Image (cartoon, grey):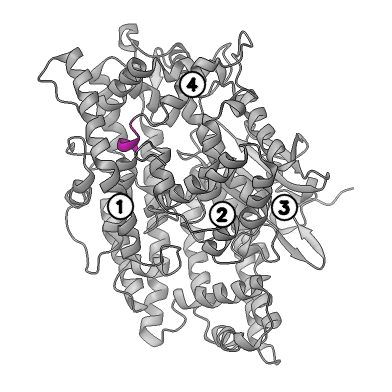
């Protein structure tokens, strides 16, 4: 008789490729495994500290790198599912566990004996014969301790530890409030006239959602597949305004989910942490570990882009407003809830291109085949679905990824559709990193999580063009993980400096505009007709439609992020007013009282983008410059792809990112390629 499994997280995973046994997991398992992981890690740290041998790279740095694997494994599962498949029990457990984890991490980072060993090895670094990757591991390890307050003493060190725990708790509460506000909102329409303008697939999906929730009519939510097309196609302006306000007041209403107090506390906590370490503000602290290097470099980029794109953006807004006034009267004022609706009308008028007319050509199954086929053509890799690999939800699909020579590379999970337990947006993550040990290459388990339009009735899942680009974007991140080829897990895959991490993802979006790629998979789901050349040409011609507005929108988020994190004094002001002031240089549409991006800005308040949102534009400069190599050599060039894999994708964070980039490109980037790409400059 087989022995009963007590806690799958604490035993060897007896699954294909050692993947997470999701089918065996219960919520109670996480608490036991995380607490045991903390206990074991503390013992491992103690063993390193008590080692009687003089500190060396192997007995200190490598030993530290290999410690805490039970904790890391347990947290990877728990934290990923908090975003992808959470529930009330897990959220409650997170409030218990995450402070314990934060306290443990601080205890390790502030362990004086451990740091002294690390510091001694670091002090001898010039006398050690280390490889480039070993040097980077030493630099990163030492830097991690310093950034976590290891050089502090006495009261300041104790205070830093308290602040780190508080920051973790606040970020978790912020995320939970946004998720609850998103899930709690429903817009139920009962009159067919209210649906005027909405595409048939959306009406079908809304009817199905209402029925699934036991209601009559058509239901719309704040999930992207519901919200985005509603704003673009609903002819009822009052309904557009109603949904817009609901979306943009998330966690900003005077209720139990309001995030204003959390924002005030969190920006002050982060500021105080940075100042304890000798920095003027949190952004200065963060940017010491980024390609940008300092605040001035970030603002230089943002200001350059604002200067280049603002005239185009102003002209675009004027053109959309003129079209709206032709329909609504000469005194009509364009409001934010009108932007998507009239922009879409203008797109149809200028390019004879309706985003909905493309959707039938992007059936999800074919898109998956197309994206996988692109990776095969560029890199020779293949994907095989394996239904024996356990998944955490029936919607999730699991694939084995193999190299051109048949060697196993990775497990890839694809999770496509919105649901109550999943946060909004799209992201790539890993349940297991890649590393090498004892001659064995331990391969990664990568996951792409999205919120795409679901199948409805007899209609399969049909993606919008933007959703196709989103898939390509996240797939680029996945390739970064899949191709990881490093010795140390902390330097593998996407473990790179934050303003470099978006290069592999954003470069993939370029393929969405290439006819040669689109014609490999884009066929009408009913007729099988290939996406017509005329439509492809219109996609290309419309690729820079409202590019100025789109750039200014991204800049507004980056300026807002920097405004919150360049503060050097406590904040007790009005969150909405502060946001409004930060946005003023790039504000294109009227500000709406009561709305507040900051209150739902999870990227910077509960994600990893604090003082780092600029990295999207930073990486856009990199990818525009880098993709020119593919344009020169052919978009399916295996030579260009091979170099990109060798010099960037496989190397992770083993060397400074600009060195990796220059090795691939042959020179440092400028914004010129991006300006040319967006039609603002001609080469």
User: CB atoms at circles 2 and 3 under 8 Å apart?
Assistant: no
Circle nearer the N terminus (1, 2): 1
Give the main secondary structure of the magenta stretch.
helix
Rendered residue at 22%/69% (across/down): 569
Q: Could you tell me how many numbered marks the image carries?
A: 4
Please name whichever residue, 515 or 483, is drawn nearer the observer in this view of the structure.
Answer: 515
| Residue matched to label 1 | 304
Please report the residue visible at 81 percent of the width from the left and 68 percent of the height from the top. 438
Distance CA(mark 3)–CA(mark 4): 53 Å
Going from N to C along the chain, the mark reached first, 2 or 4, is: 4
Tell me if 405 is positioned left or right of 539 in this view.
right
For disc 2, the marked residue is: 665
Which numbered disc, 1 or 2, marks the residue closer to the eye? Answer: 2
| Mark 1: secondary structure | helix
Q: CA distance from mark 1 to mark 2?
A: 23 Å
Category of crowding for the residue at label 3, using alpha-carbon neighbours closer than 10 angstroms: few (below 14), some (14–19), many (at least 20): some
Instruction: Name the N-terminal-most of marks 2 and 3.
Output: 3
Q: Secondary structure at mark 3?
A: helix
Q: In front: mark 3 or mark 4?
A: 4
Quadrant housing the C terminus: top left
CA gap, disc 2 and disc 3: 46 Å
- Which residue position is annotated with label 4? 537
* In this rendering, position of residue 492 left or right of residue 355: right
Q: In the visual, does 194 lie left or right of 16?
A: left
| Alpha carbon separation for disc pair 1 and 4 | 31 Å
**Disc 4 element:** helix
In the rendered structure, which disc, 3 or 4, sits on the residue that comes first in sequence? 3
Q: Which residue is mark 3?
A: 8
- Residue range of the region highlighted in magenta in the rendering: 546-550
Nearer to us: label 2 or label 3: 2
Q: What is the crowding at mark 2: few (fewer than 14 residues within 10 Å), some, or many (at least 20)?
A: many
Say what secondary structure mark 2 lies in.
helix
């Amino acid at each position: 008789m087989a022995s009963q499994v007590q806690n799958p997280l604490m035993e060897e995973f007896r699954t294909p490729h050692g993947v997470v046994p999701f089918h065996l997991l219960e919520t109670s398992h996480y608490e036991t495994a995380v607490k045991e992981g903390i206990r074991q890690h503390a013992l491992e740290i103690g063993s390193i500290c008590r080692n009687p041998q003089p500190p060396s790279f192997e007995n200190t740095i490598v030993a530290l790198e290999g410690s805490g694997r039970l904790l890391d494994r347990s947290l990877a599962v728990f934290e990923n599912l908090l975003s992808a498949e959470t529930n009330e029990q897990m959220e409650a457990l997170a409030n218990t566990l995450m402070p314990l984890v934060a306290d443990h991490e601080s205890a390790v980072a502030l362990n004086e004996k451990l740091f002294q060993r690390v510091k001694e090895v670091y002090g001898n670094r010039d006398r050690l014969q280390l490889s480039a990757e070993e040097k980077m591991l030493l630099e990163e390890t030492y830097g991690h301790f310093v950034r976590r307050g290891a050089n502090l003493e006495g009261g300041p060190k104790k205070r830093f530890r308290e602040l780190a725990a508080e920051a973790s708790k606040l970020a978790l509460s912020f995320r939970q409030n946004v998720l609850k506000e998103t899930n709690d909102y429903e817009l139920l329409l009962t009159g067919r006239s209210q649906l005027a303008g909405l595409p048939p697939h959306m009406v079908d999906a809304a009817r199905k959602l209402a029925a699934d929730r036991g209601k009559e009519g058509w239901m719309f939510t704040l999930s992207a597949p519901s919200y985005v097309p509603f704003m673009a196609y609903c002819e009822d302006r009052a309904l557009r305004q109603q949904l817009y306000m609901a979306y943009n007041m998330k966690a900003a209403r005077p209720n139990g989910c309001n995030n204003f107090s959390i924002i005030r506390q969190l920006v002050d906590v982060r500021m105080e942490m940075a100042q304890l370490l000798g920095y003027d503000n949190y952004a200065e602290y963060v940017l010491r570990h980024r390609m940008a290097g300092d605040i001035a470099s970030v603002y230089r980029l943002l200001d350059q882009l604002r200067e280049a794109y603002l005239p185009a953006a102003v002209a675009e807004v004027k053109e959309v407003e003129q079209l709206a006034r032709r329909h609504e009267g000469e005194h009509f004022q364009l409001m934010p809830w009108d932007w998507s609706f009239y922009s879409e009308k203008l797109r149809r008028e200028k390019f004879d291109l309706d985003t909905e007319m493309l959707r039938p050509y992007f059936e999800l199954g074919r898109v998956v085949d197309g994206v996988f086929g692109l990776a095969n053509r560029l890199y020779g890799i293949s994907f095989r679905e394996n239904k024996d690999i356990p998944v955490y939800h029936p919607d999730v699909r699991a694939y084995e990824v193999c190299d051109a020579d048949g060697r196993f590379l990775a497990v890839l999970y694809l999770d496509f559709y919105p649901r109550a337990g999943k946060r909004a947006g799209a992201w790539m993550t890993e349940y297991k990193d890649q590393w090498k040990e004892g001659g064995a290459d331990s391969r990664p388990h990568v996951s792409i999580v999205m919120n795409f339009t679901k199948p409805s009735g007899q209609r399969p899942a049909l993606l919008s063009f933007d959703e196709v680009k989103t898939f390509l974007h996240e797939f680029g991140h996945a390739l970064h993980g899949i191709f990881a080829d490093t010795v140390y897990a902390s330097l593998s895959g996407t473990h790179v400096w934050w303003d470099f991490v978006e290069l592999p993802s954003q470069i993939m979006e370029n393929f969405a505009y290439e006819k040669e790629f689109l014609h490999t998979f884009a066929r009408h789901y009913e007729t099988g007709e290939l996406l017509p050349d005329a439509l492809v040409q219109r996609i290309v011609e419309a690729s820079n439609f409202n590019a100025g507005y789109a750039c200014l929108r991204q800049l507004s988020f980056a300026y807002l992020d920097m405004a919150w994190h360049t503060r050097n004094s406590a904040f007790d002001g009005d969150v909405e007013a502060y946001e409004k002031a930060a946005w003023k240089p790039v504000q294109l549409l009227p500000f709406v009282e009561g709305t507040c991006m900051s209150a739902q800005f999870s990227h910077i308040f509960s994600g990893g983008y604090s003082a780092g949102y600029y990295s999207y534009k930073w990486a856009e400069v990199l990818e525009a410059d880098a993709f020119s190599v593919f344009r020169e050599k052919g978009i399916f060039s295996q030579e260009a792809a091979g170099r990109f894999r060798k010099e960037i994708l496989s190397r992770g964070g083993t060397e400074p990112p600009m060195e990796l980039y220059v090795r691939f490109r042959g020179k440092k980037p400028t914004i010129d390629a991006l300006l040319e790409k967006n039609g603002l400059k001609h080469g």
